[in-house]
Amino acid sequence: MRYINRDSYLQQLINRKDNGEIKVITGPRRCGKSWLLNRIYKDYLIKYGIPEKNIIIVSFDVDEEENGDLSDRQALKSYLYSRITSKEEPYYVILDEVQEVEGFEKLVNGLNAKDNVDVYVTGSNSHFLSSDINTIFRGRGDEVRVYPFSFKEFCIGRTEPTNELWKEYYTYGGMPGLRKHQTPEEKIVYLQRLWNKTYLDDVVERHHVKNREALDALVDALCSSVGSLTNPNRVSNILQSTQNVKIDPDTVSNYISYLEEAFLFEGAKRYNIKGNKYFESIKKYYTVDVGLRNAKLNFRQQEVTHIMENVIYNELRMRGYAVDVGVIESREMRNGKQEYIQYEVDFIASNGINKYYIQSAYAIDDEEKRQQEMKSLLKIDDSFQKIVIVGQDIAEYSDNKGIRFMGLFQFLQSGL
């Protein structure tokens, strides 16, 4: 099995090395955070010249019987300080799933105050949300968000045709643990076990959820409607009408926040491009991994158009873009009277310097379809790039109106 180096994340860690801040590695459970730090980054540090004894790794996701009960803060503190024996030599402390230690914040902040100690922690829940990092770590937290394998990473070491790899990826997704499972049956069992025994159990336990049936039904509803505009009221009505599950909108909102805090879903806000404002309650939700999404639905709904849209969203987020979904309103003559017509823009992606308006189109088979995909983009009158990503394998080109057309595989392998 080939070693996947995860170069982009490794470079982010290298860039942050010895910067005086606490590196906070976030992402869903089993997405590769521990491997990134405990293997990839450790190997880099050793190659860089750091003695292995100066790299101190403690994982709270496994038993540490040889070191005693390190989930106790005082025991952990004693252990770590017994390993840090010099005030001059550099030390690198990696604490995996440290939120399991009550009062970990004081310990981590104390370690970070030492000039020769560089601290890295991982987390899979709300303790490590971006909004909380500055509070927990007194403004000294520096987040690195980790996702399951991108399509480019998924293809490393594979020799099959790209179309075959794409089909496998959009079916089973990019969870790193899948590389240990060969048959479709094994992969399905693995993904469904992650949902039932890792993710949902964790959410239920952490937030004391009393109605697990409703939570499970909500997850199914979000998985079924990826890329569709929704809000808690709408979800509540759908659950009651289709599954006879009664759950009020406030509880729906709470449950969605729990799932977002566990990094299982992300909500993209709806933005009015001409009005320069957000629609407060309406979002599109995307799963962190399409294979997990498919497994939760027992692979019943394999709509490649929606799955492709979800993959594009995840890829943009992996590349560091903030992503909204757009709407542009146009006053037009319809049926003899002026009406406001809304045109949807799949994604507005921004990294602070560049902004892109993006449409996802699985296929453009004729001129009518091409004009349809362009319609909303042509309504935008600013100078930022406008792009249509096509599921077909096409050579990139720009039309006479400045709209770029590029193939999905080109985007996944090379970016915008």
Image (cartoon, rainbow, N blue to C red):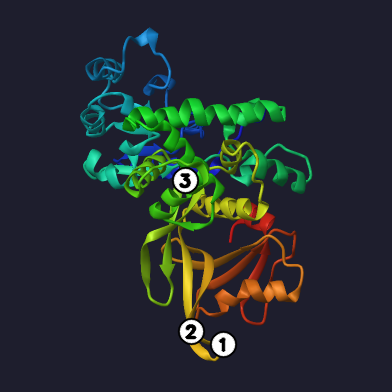
Which class describes the residues within 10 Å of circle 1: few (<14), some (14-19), or many (20+)? few
Q: Nearer the viewer, residue 338 or 42?
A: 338
- The amino acid on which the numbered mark 2 sits, given as a three-letter code, is Glu
Vertical arrangement, residue 302 with respect to residue 69, above or below: below
Picture coordinates of residue 11, whole percent (x, y): 48, 44
- The amino acid on which the numbered mark 3 sits, given as a three-letter code, is Leu
Q: Which element type, helix, strand or loop, lies under badge 2?
A: strand
Which class describes the residues within 10 Å of circle 2: few (<14), some (14-19), or many (20+)? few
Q: In whole angstroms, how far apart are the C-alphas of marks 3 and 1?
A: 37 Å
- The amino acid on which the numbered mark 1 sits, given as a three-letter code, is Asn
Picture coordinates of residue 309, whole percent (x, y): 59, 55
Callout 1–callout 2 Cβ contact below 8 Å: yes
Q: In whole angstroms, how far apart are the C-alphas of marks 1 and 2?
A: 9 Å
Q: Quadrant of residue 290?
A: top right
Image quadrant in which the C terminus is located: bottom right
Query: Does residue 145 appear anywhere in the picture?
Result: yes
Which class describes the residues within 10 Å of circle 3: few (<14), some (14-19), or many (20+)? many
Q: Identify residue for label 2.
A: 339
Vertical arrangement, residue 110 with respect to residue 380, above or below: above
Mark 2 against mark 3, which lies toward the viewer? 3
Mark 1 against mark 2, which lies toward the viewer? 1
Vertical arrangement, residue 69 with respect to residue 282, above or below: above
Residue at the image point whose x is 69% and y is 27% from the top: 185
Q: Which element type, helix, strand or loop, lies under badge 3?
A: helix
Picture coordinates of residue 245, whole percent (x, y): 45, 40
Q: Identify residue for label 3.
A: 239
Callout 3–callout 1 Cβ contact below 8 Å: no
Residue at the image point whose x is 40% and y is 42% from the top: 246
Q: Nearer the viewer, residue 43 or 366?
A: 366
Q: Identify residue for label 1.
A: 335
Q: Which element type, helix, strand or loop, lies under badge 1?
A: loop
Picture coordinates of residue 88, whole percent (x, y): 28, 27
